[in-house]
Image (cartoon, rainbow, N blue to C red):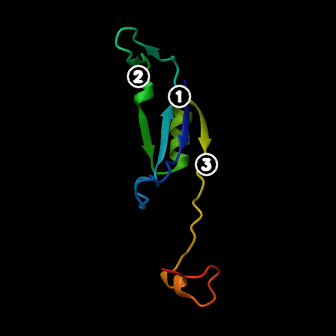
Amino acid sequence: MSAKIYRPAKTAMQSGKAKTHVWILEFDQAIPRKIDPMMGYTSSADTRQQVKLTFETQEQAEAYAQREGIEYRVLQPKEAKRQVVSYTDNFKFSRQQPWTH
């Protein structure tokens, strides 16, 4: 039984950072998925794959995994590089590209 501990990334659909400050422990797939020959549905007998545990800090997630005897790996989050842009910079005299209509 193995798992990964990570902090989720910001959703691409909105600019907010909701639900990105928690750490998630998610179990890896232990049994391969099967395709139903008649309907084509993909199914699995591994129910641990559906479990996602949330923690306030990385240390809490690691402590839980150690206490329960779960092998784990930690995926460190990559911080977004924010570029500060001002609307008034569009109309600067020293602008690199000319401003046109």
Which three-letter amino acid code belongs to the residue tagged 1?
A: Asp
Q: Element type at marker 2?
A: helix
Depth check: give the residue in front, 54 or 39.
Answer: 39
C-alpha separation, residue under disc 3 versus residue under disc 2: 26 Å
User: Which amino acid type corresponds to the residue marked 2 in the rendered image?
Assistant: Thr
Residue 4 at x, y percent in the picture: 55, 36
Which badge, 3 or 2, is on the more N-terminal residue?
2
Nearest the camera: 87 or 77?
87
Q: What residue is pinned by disc 1?
A: 28
Mark 2 or 1, nearer chain start: 1
Q: Report the residue at 59% width, 58% height from top.
A: 79
Q: Residue furthest bottom?
A: 93
Separation (CA) of disc 2 from disc 1: 11 Å
The residue under label 3 is 76
Which residue occupies the extreme front position in the image?
Answer: 101
Tell me what residue is drawn at x 56 percent, y 34 percent: 66
Residue that carries the numbered disc 2 in the rendered image: 47
Residue 57 rendering spot, x and y as whole percentages: 50, 51
Circle 2/circle 1 CB separation < 8 Å:
no
Q: Is residue 87 above or below residue 82?
A: below
Mark 1 closeness class: few <14, some 14–19, many ≥20 residues within 10 Å: some
Residue 80, picture quadrant? bottom right
- Cα–Cα gap, marks 1 and 3: 17 Å
Would you place residue 17 above or below residue 40 in this image? below
Residue sitting nearer the eye, 40 or 90: 90
Q: Position of residue 46 (x, y in %)?
A: 44, 19
Horizontal side of residue 10 vs 97, given as left or right: left
